[in-house]
Image (cartoon, rainbow, N blue to C red):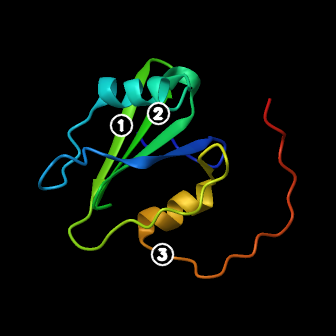
């Protein structure tokens, strides 16, 4: 069941996954992506955060998420076009609306965000 929403923290891995693949497939799965999260991002894969990975061509996207009893991997492959990742914060974080726009293929040329309260990170 799709269990993602605005209450999660989303972190975009800014390097390409499987950039050695000639056809651009994303062959990495649960264990390899978890290794990237812990080894390269310095984060705990079981934290409940959602980790976002793109291939070199940006035609494939994977979201790795830990739920209460195991990992969930969401995977989308575009038949035409590419994903355009939004600008990330210093820690690689993006917001839920930015993820939805990226998945739907909508590029916001000018984005004005109204002030909102955010709980400071610990």
The part of the image, by quadrant, that contains residue 18 is top left
Mark 2 touching mark 1, by CB under 8 A?
Answer: yes
Task: Tell me if label 3 and label 1 are in contact, CB under 8 Å.
Answer: no
Residue at the image point whose x is 87% and y is 64% from the top? 115
Q: Which residue is mark 2?
A: 65
Tag on residue 4? none
Q: Could you tell me which secondary element the residue under label 1 belongs to?
A: strand
Q: Residues within 10 Å of mark 2 (few under 14, many from 20)?
A: many
Q: Nearer the viewer, residue 78 or 91?
A: 91
Identify the secondary structure beneath mark 2. strand
Which corner quadrant of the image does residue 33 belong to?
top left
**Above or below, 52 relative to 78:** above
Q: How many marks can you see?
A: 3
**Closer-to-camera residue (36/64):** 36
Q: Image quarter for residue 57?
A: bottom left
Residue 75 drawn at (x, y percent) = 31, 47
In terms of secondary structure, where does tag 3 sit?
A: loop
Label 1 sits on residue? 73
**Residue 111 locus on image (x, y percent):** 68, 76
- The residue shown at (83%, 48%) is 118
Q: Which residue is mark 3?
A: 106
């Amino acid at each position: 069941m799709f269990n993602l929403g605005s209450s999660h923290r989303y972190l975009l891995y800014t390097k390409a996954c499987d950039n050695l693949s000639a056809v651009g497939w994303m062959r990495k799965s649960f264990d390899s992506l978890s290794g990237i999260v812990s080894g390269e991002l310095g984060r705990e894969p079981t934290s409940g955060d959602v980790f976002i990975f793109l291939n070199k061509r940006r035609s494939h996207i994977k979201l790795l998420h830990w739920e209460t009893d195991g990992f969930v991997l969401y995977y989308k492959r575009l038949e035409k076009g590419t994903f355009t990742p939004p600008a990330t914060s210093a820690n690689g974080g993006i917001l839920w609306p930015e993820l939805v726009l990226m998945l739907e293929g909508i590029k916001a040329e000018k984005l004005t965000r109204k002030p909102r309260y955010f709980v400071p990170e610990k």
